[in-house]
Every structure is written in C-alpha cells, then in structure tokens.
Amino acid sequence: MSRLRKGTAAGALAVAVVGGFEGLRTTAYEDAVGVGTICYGETRGVHLGDHKTKPECDAMLLARLNEFAGRVEACVKRPMPDKVEVAFVSLAYNIGEGAFCASSVARLYNAGESRAACDAIMRFNRAGGHVLSGLTNRRKRERALCLEDLS
C-alpha cells in the first residue's frame, strides 16, 4: 500500500488535485482520443452507457490513486516529498504508470535532478499527437506543485 492512503494528508491532497483536474462525470463518455471514461477519468472496464454515483466515483478514485502511487513509488528510487509524489501520481494517472516509469520525469528524479524532473512534466501536454490547452494547464499546475516541496 502506498503513502496515499485514506486519512493521510498526501492522500487527501492527491484526491483533491487529481479529482479537480479530471472533473467528475457520472455517466460514461468518450475522452479526447475516443477512450471510454467515467467518474474522475477512470478508463479501466468502462463501457459507454455506464453510470456511477458520486460516492462510487470517490471510492474508485481513491483506490486507483493508491494503485498508481504504489507503482510510482516502485519506479522512483529516491524519497519523494508529499507534493512531489502527488504531482508524479497525477501525471502517471493521466499518462499511465508504464509511460511515467519510462519517462524523463522519473529518469531525471532518480538521477538526483529534482528540479529538471519537475520541469519535464511540461513535456506531457499532448493527446492524439496534438497539444491540448487543458493538458498544458494541468501540467503547469502539476509542475508548480512538484516545485513547491523542493524550495
């Protein structure tokens, strides 16, 4: 189990940050690249026409963030302050944990280049090969969060 558990400050921050970025939609829809999505950006096992309640969505987000945090913690070998971890989990939740673990963000952080790792978050502002302003704004906020704990 990761540090982003229910009842922890990091867990509450992660839910607020990722939930805020993703937005809540209780009926399944196709995202910008045609993937079935529901709740706070959940794509696993989603079919168009699915419906969830807000409490179901909240529980689903908490469980998924814990999974993603565990994977981020496994591929980032250096200790992470809470806000750095939340920024990294938010990025991994959006791009996938495999992409995160293979990313310049993880590589730079593991090499001790924390500030460069936070800056590298900005490279992930595309979907379907196109720059999206919503992703650019999200990456700016993730980068700022990441840098907060480095000062």
Image: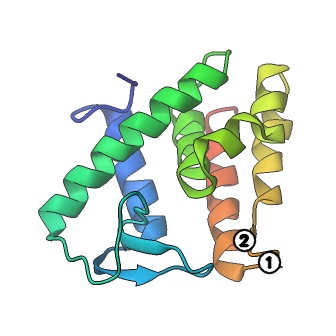
Q: Position of residue 37 (x, y in %)?
A: 42, 72
- Three-letter amino acid code at the position of disc 2: Thr
Instruction: Point out which mark residue 131 bears.
Output: 1
Q: Mark 1 vs mark 2: give the one in front.
A: 1
Quadrant for the C terminus in the image: top right
Q: Is residue 129 left or right of residue 84?
A: right
Q: Is residue 94 left or right of residue 13?
A: right
Task: Give the class, few, some or many, for how many residues have Cα within 10 Å of label 1's Cα (few <14, many ≥20).
Answer: few
Q: Position of residue 36 (x, y in %)?
A: 44, 74
Between the residue at mark 1 and the residue at mark 2, the CA separation in whole angstroms equals 7 Å
Question: Which secondary structure, mark 2?
Answer: helix
**13, 24: nearer the viewer:** 24
Task: Give the class, few, some or many, for how many residues have Cα within 10 Å of label 2's Cα (few <14, many ≥20).
Answer: some
Classify 44 as above or below 97.
Answer: below
- The residue lying at 77 percent from left, 28 percent from top is 109
Mark closer to the chain start, 1 or 2: 1
* Tag 2 residue: 136
Q: In which quarter of the view is residue 114 placed? A: top right
